[in-house]
Amino acid sequence: MISPPKKDNVFRALDRKLGAVAEFTMRQYRTKLSTWVVLGIGFIAISIVVLFYVDSMQQEIEAIDNDGDSYDWDGDGYPTGQERIYGTDPDNPDSNPGTFTPPIAPDPPEKWINEDDFDWDLYATGDTTAGYDDDGDCRLADSTESQKDKNRNNVNCDIILDYSVIRGEWNEPQSDGFVDEDPDEDKYGKEAIHRAFLLAIGKMGFVFLLGIFLPLFLATGLIREEMENSTMHFMIAKPIARRDIFLGRIVGYLGIVWPYIIAMGVLVGLISGFAGPSSGFFRFADLGMWMAIIFATMLATLVYGMLFCALGTLWKRGIVLALPFAAWELGMAIVSFNAPSASILRFSVIGWSLNIIDAAALVVWPNMSLFINMGLWGGGHNTGGYWDNSIEGAGALSAFASDTGLGISPIATIVVSTVVLLFQAIILWIIGSAVFKGKEIE
Amino acid sequence: MMPDIQQVGPAQTQQWAPEISAPVVLLENVSKTYGKIHALSEITLALSGGVTGILGMNGAGKSTLFNLLMGKLKPSSGSIKLFGTDPWKNPAPYARIGFVPEHEKMHDWMTAHSFVSLFARLNGLTRDEAKVEADRVLDFVGLTDVAHKQIGRYSKGMRQRVKIAHALVNDPDLIVLDEPLQGCDPLARTTIMNVIRELGKMGRTVLVSSHILHEIERITEQIVILHNGRLLALGNLHAIREKMDNIPHTISIGCENPKELAKDIINNDAVFGISFPSNDNLQVQTHNLNEVHKELPSLIVANGHIVNSIDNPDDDLGSILNYLTGGLN
């Protein structure tokens, strides 16, 4: 029975030539062992990093008593911090709050560890003064006014935060004595390590590793293998332009790679969402980060797919041509960590892809640079200098977080980077199909 | 090689229509060279309708000719037109062309039905239309009952028939078959030959290449002979045959009593020599093959000879080529 002809809509039109090439390509991938090996290795590589992360989230970061006020120097059972607040002599066993009427019970020493955390909730963008003396040891009655305003900004017991627009980073915080000097290392460290992990796995694991190696092994042979196997004859002998064959093959490759990237992103996102530090049972706040990581990796696999497929079409050993590109991109990835605004990054694919993740991090985690800066300062209690007191995780986060380097707002950065990557893909498609068109197939 | 930028343009497949007056296949002074090697030189050929056999030894240029027709190679000089359109620049004519490649490699992991229907969609059919079309062409080549088996598990002859089925999608006007009978068992050969003959009867233009004269002879009389990249002869096989009848031929007859048979055959005027290579074999030398073949059956029946086989050992492409080139090769 012949059904009456249906009107050709977009979906029916796609169902024809291009869709057929794409469907063929996806089914072909499924039958190849190499596909599963490549996807499996990608899964294992990402999983190993995730295991290290989950392990570090399980371990408590040792609490450090930066100001030393949990110790009972005179042996009367009262920690120094408690004695200071009540105005008794921490070095005299006979002077302690237990002699008061009614007597005050001694605090457990733990209460005076991490008792003066950073006060993020009090900070607003543009403020230059921040901090709150939670444990009251700055505001002590017997402190002199100059002790209470050591940084001489006429605000007692605060921290001066000074963002240097020229250097593009925060200056070392100037604190009045004993303000925010005993932060919660575990709380800060977990948060910092978690953010560093997301940035590291997003940039190096997803965009670099998956973004380059999946196309390197899966897309380089898209046209070439068919030409070598003499199975391209079937396709060439049909009324379909070679440019459309090229595009259809890429669409089929994306049909395998994109769902894989989304699945991996969702999987790692779920694991880190449950394992990461959060007030609830799950870190919903990271959703935007994972969307950006998946999106950036999808764009990277699109551009690299076009590039490597074109190189494979150009020469039998296209992978040899592709490797220098992969090396170049690795170099650019390293450059982007240290000099995110270097103009050489504009001539890479990874520079634009990483921009998307960096920009998303600024949206999802506002005050990121302040967060890093405070962690590096670490309470400023040690006399050795800026870095001596850094909290665990702050250094790692500082290494993986970078500015977007375009000098525009994060959202604009994401839009511009996306447009540039799509433009790169289209140019490479035109070049690739021109190469394919000029190829004689034996 | 520099990519040919000019070919990258808007798809022209939608608007394409064949030129009414143009021959299906038209080659004008087409040459294909690889460095100093001339794979094809100065071929001029126009074909429309009917089955044409492309005969030639291995390396004569048959596959190069087909690859040029199928837009896989670009001619070094000359022009190729299919339905009036240059296939290297525009793949649109392939909507009306089916191609059976010579290569044995196929997508072994697919079933015949999914292979044919998927590639039918490249002709512009939708998924549903393609399935109906795949059923039709697989039925035409007689593979309906095994259509859902993997191609990898097919015999050589079945694989060839799948290729033919895939070429018949959308009822093409021109079907190009590159060595379709190579490596097939006798049963598959007969089936494929019948399919090709039927296509010819349906008014399609069919090009079929082979290096074996008898295969082509059973399919068609219209032949093109290629030799060392040149077009050696074009026309009716019988006409060539008749000319050749006047040169000496050998007929080999396998029979139980060669000497008795020889006595009867020697009376024929066309026979000028007889030899006995073995006890059950007789070789007859003649300069008029047709004459002897006409007399032979009645002679055998009349005298009650027991004959096992009659062969013309030198009646092959080699001897035709030898004749046409005047023994120069």
Image (cartoon, coloured by chain):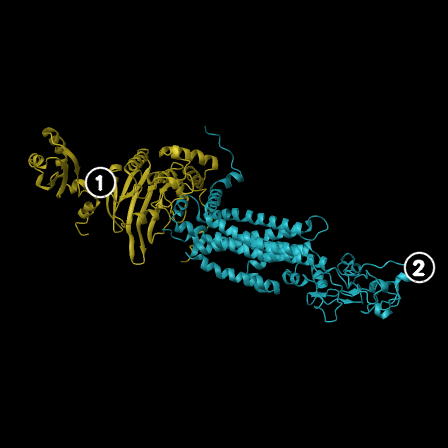
Observer-nearest of B274 and A238:
B274
Please give the label number shown on residue A154.
none
Q: How many labels were placed on the picture? A: 2
Q: Which chain is cyan in the picture? A: A
Question: Can the viewer see residue B23 in this picture?
Answer: no
Q: Which chain is yellow in the picture? A: B
Q: Quadrant of residue B218?
A: top left
User: Quick one: quadrant of the N terminus of chain A?
Assistant: top left
Could you tell whether B233 is left or right of A73 in the image? left
Observer-nearest of A12 and B262:
B262
User: Which residue type does callout 2 highlight?
Assistant: Thr
Please give the label number shown on residue B237.
1
Residue B176 x, y percent position in the rendering: 33, 42
Q: Residues within 10 Å of mark 1 (few under 14, many from 20)?
A: some
Could you tell whether A175 is left or right of A38 in the image? right
Q: Are marks 2 and 1 on the same chain?
A: no
Please give the label number shown on residue A101.
2
Q: Quadrant of residue B19?
A: top left
Secondary structure under tag 2 reads loop
User: Which residue type does callout 1 highlight?
Assistant: Leu
Secondary structure under tag 1 reads helix
Residue A284 x, y percent position in the rendering: 68, 49
